[in-house]
Amino acid sequence: MLEYIFFHQQSLEQFVMRLEQQSIPYQARDDDMGLVVAIADDLPDAITDPLDAYYDKLLEDAENLSVEEGEAAENYTAGLNITLSDGRTTSVEVAPELLNRILGAISFAELNQLLEAIVSSVENPDNRPLCQR
């Protein structure tokens, strides 16, 4: 599943409305870090790339709104949820600027693949050289 996290209800509602307009099935839930919307991770890039761009815009708008409302910028954070092989989910706090830079270069699907590879390598270490795997 591709997960999008929101810190403001309004941003979540706008994103969900976009999903519903495009008839994209989703699951929404409250999380310790914020409001999470999950969609299937096997959707074509032609669908997910515009969603990723829209999500980035919503995050940027929410950050600007927070600054306008006087919330301290240093309190603004982003997170990535990672599912471990035993089914547990953990959240990784990431600076929003870094996450935006990453998502400017790769898609959410590609980021998800990277995270899955990291989790797999941490949970199942293999000390052999890469050329021998």
Image (spheres, rainbow, N blue to C red):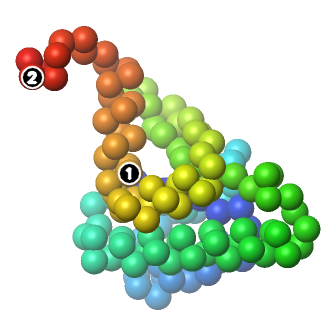
Question: For the point 71% across and 61% down, which residue is it?
Answer: 7
Residue 5 horizontal/vertical position (percent): 59, 58
Quadrant, the N terminus: bottom left
Q: Is residue 87 above or below residue 25?
A: above
Label at residue 131: 2
Q: Pointer 1: what residue? A: 111
Q: Is residue 76 left or right of residue 39?
A: right
* Chain-order first, disc 2 or disc 1: 1
Q: Quadrant of residue 132?
A: top left
Q: Nearer the viewer, residue 95 or 17?
A: 95
Dot 1, how many residues are within 10 Å of its Cα: few (below 14), some (14-19), or many (20+)?
Answer: some
Q: Quadrant of residue 22?
A: bottom left
Residue 57 horizontal/vertical position (percent): 57, 76
Query: Cα distance, mark 2 to mark 1?
Result: 24 Å
Quadrant, the C terminus: top left
Q: Is residue 28 left or right of residue 53?
A: right
Label at residue 121: none
Given the image, on which type of amino acid does mark 1 rest?
Leu
